[in-house]
Image (spheres, grey):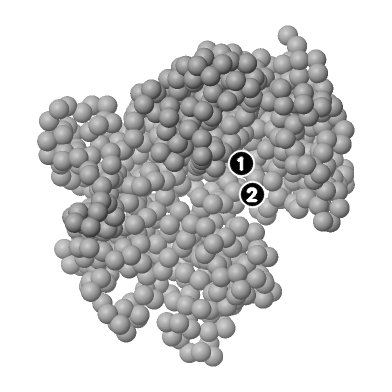
Amino acid sequence: MSGESSGNLLSVENLTVRFPVKQGGLFKRKTFLYAVDDVSFAVKRGETLAIVGESGSGKTTAALAVARLVDAHLGTVKLGEHDFLTLKDEALRKARAKVQFIFQDPYASLNPRLRAEAVVREPLDSLDEGEPSKRQETVDELFKAVGLRPEQQRLFPHQFSGGQRQRIGIARALATRPELIICDEPVSALDVAVQAQILNLLRKLQKDFGLTYLFISHDLGVVQHMCDSIAVMYMGKIVEHADRKSLFNNPKHPYTQALLSAVPSVDKKRREATKRILIPGDPPDPINPPKGCRFANRCPIAVPSCSDSQPALRALGDSHTVACHLVDC
Amino acid sequence: MAALLKVENLRIELTTRDGIAPVIDDLSLELNAGETLSFVGESGCGKSMTALAIMGLLPDKVGRVASGTIMFDGEDLAKASDARLREIRGNDISMIFQEPMTSLNPVYTIGEQIAEVLRRHQNMDQAAARSRALELLDAVRIPNPKSRVDDYPHQMSGGQRQRVMIAIALACEPKILIADEPTTALDVTVQAQIFDLLRDLGKETGTAIILITHDMGAVAEMAERMIVMYAGRKAEEGPVDQIIEHPRHPYTKGLISCVPHLVAQLSDDRPELTEVRGIVPSLMDFGRDECLFSSRCERADDKCRSSRPTEMKFKNDQHSACWQAKEL
């Protein structure tokens, strides 16, 4: 599958990220923790792919690797035609303009000593985008696009509320006219009433600027609202990948089913229809993952043979893949 | 049946650099034995302050109960001495906090931290307290409690730590358990386990629970009644199902519809989320004689901006502090 012809802006193949772990003495073999283990996914231009999973599942690490904020061990990340991971020096710097990041915590991700306008202008200066004389104009436009007033450009980050700070973070991400924006839990640090403002803004900007989002979140309600397709991760692996409607209306993997059933709901019909599937215990030790299916020790339907080999992702219809030995294809 | 806890006209004042501000302004509520009541609202609306006032844990010198009563078992907690409050805390009323990581003491084993409560309040000896601690760990579904009782907090996962917190809080079978955002720091599957645990334990021991949260889904799942708080005042109160079905205050309505919820059958259309414009007013504006939500409300008129709404009571036991509650 080459990128553009299939309509994919981003296609990630066999991405693996590992971290060295200190263990034992001098002569012990070096061990690694595989935070992202052989993960592949693709995002169509103008669409949103969400990666969901619980803490420690590797969703944020996968996103960081796509943006080259951590080093991948194996795999390719194609942006259009080019493998983003092999780019060097000037080519990399140029390509970085096409991939931008919105971070989770708007309190920590803005430099407290820069004025808001400088925060938004910084990527333009450092990536040398556009004429220096026109940059102020770009900043003005961006402030307008994210719903901030022009006079707020002179303020410092601490003078803004959480929601406004996240707007500055979004303006900064938009500054270099990127194609792909990686949103890592963009609303989870915000108050509920403010979340809606940011989510609506993100969807509006996607339409206006033709953006492609890689959306990382643990909040399934938000994901349901924002994305076109979803990949569910568990312990560094994708266990299910489907379009929005099939995943939420017809989840196949027992982990996805448990995850969805655990979300509390205000919809009385859904509450009555859902039987909560409890998954007891904790995930296994990530440094020594089990040989077989990684979910087997908590899975409500596991059989002994599940622990023998790892299930591969298999296709169930057009846009639905699942990694489980027990799901019929 | 007389209420277990009755708060009347509570006013809590905070001393800030800019002067004195009422963080809680004329709040009244009742909690019945065995029920689960939920406080809902954004941060800075006074949910936790109310809980701290009930526990007698308002920050020293900064916060104080200016007027009103907190009646528990025939006793006014607002006037109780520090020594008396210490007896009540952990014994009759106990609390679990949002961050299970920081609310346990890292240098004591979890068994010791549970036993401490029992020794202090129930005068148990070392051995009895320890064996009761084991029972409690089992009750909060920590697998293999015998081998975990001598673990330190850092050896446990977030969910397990929150279970230990619950074990400590329930050690003396309190009449009221206040849970302040008990699952915000946890994953959803763990949250579901904690909710199940709280519900089961509440049923077994007859403990009344006050659940503080901003998640309407959690409220719908856990509580029978809810109080929606806004800027230190009660916006709406009533049975949970009813309020979700038909909120009588624009703020409640906003809180419910601004969050994308999972529904029984997902369809293709995704309407824009309803936004609640703006943010909670600053503390210095809290005492004003107006509806404090009026600056964010689409229905606000001159009356809303010039006088504080009185509470309107509906036949179905719903209360709303909105001038236009009838039309909503």
Q: Nearer the viewer, residue B278 or B52?
A: B52
Image coords of residue A178 (percent x, y):
40, 72
| Residue at which label 1 appears | B255
Total marks placed: 2
| Gap in angstroms between the C-alphas marked 2 and 1 | 8 Å
Instruction: Check disc 2: other Cα within 10 Å, few if <14, some if 14-19, many if 20+.
Output: many
Q: Quadrant of the N terminus of chain B?
A: top right
> Could you tell me which chain the residue with mark 2 belongs to?
B
Mark 2 near mark 1, Cβ–Cβ under 8 Å?
Answer: yes
Element on which disc 2 rests: loop
Provide the secondary structure element on which disc 1 rests.
helix
Q: Looking at numbered disc 1 in the image, what kind of residue is underneath it? A: Leu
Which residue: 42% across, 43% down?
Answer: A220
Q: Is residue A156 left or right of residue A21?
A: right
Find residue A102 and report its horizontal and vertical position in percent.
46, 63
Q: Is residue B36 above or below residue A321?
A: above
Relative placement, left or right, of A259 versus B307 is: left
The kind of residue on which mark 2 rests is Val
Residue B56 horizontal/vertical position (percent): 75, 31
Query: Which of the 4 quarters of the picture holds residue B146?
Result: top left
Residue A240 showing in the rendered view: no
Q: Earlier along the polypeptide chain: callout 2 or callout 1?
A: 1
Residue B294: x %, y % from top left = 77, 48
What residue does disc 2 label? B276
Q: Which residue is at 31% across, 78% downward?
A: A92
Q: Residue at x 62, y 29 (%)?
A: B95
Query: Which of the numbered marks, if any, corresponds to residue B282?
Result: none
Q: Quadrant of the C terminus of chain B?
A: top right
Q: Which residue is drawn at the image coordinates 36% and 26% (left, top)?
A: B147
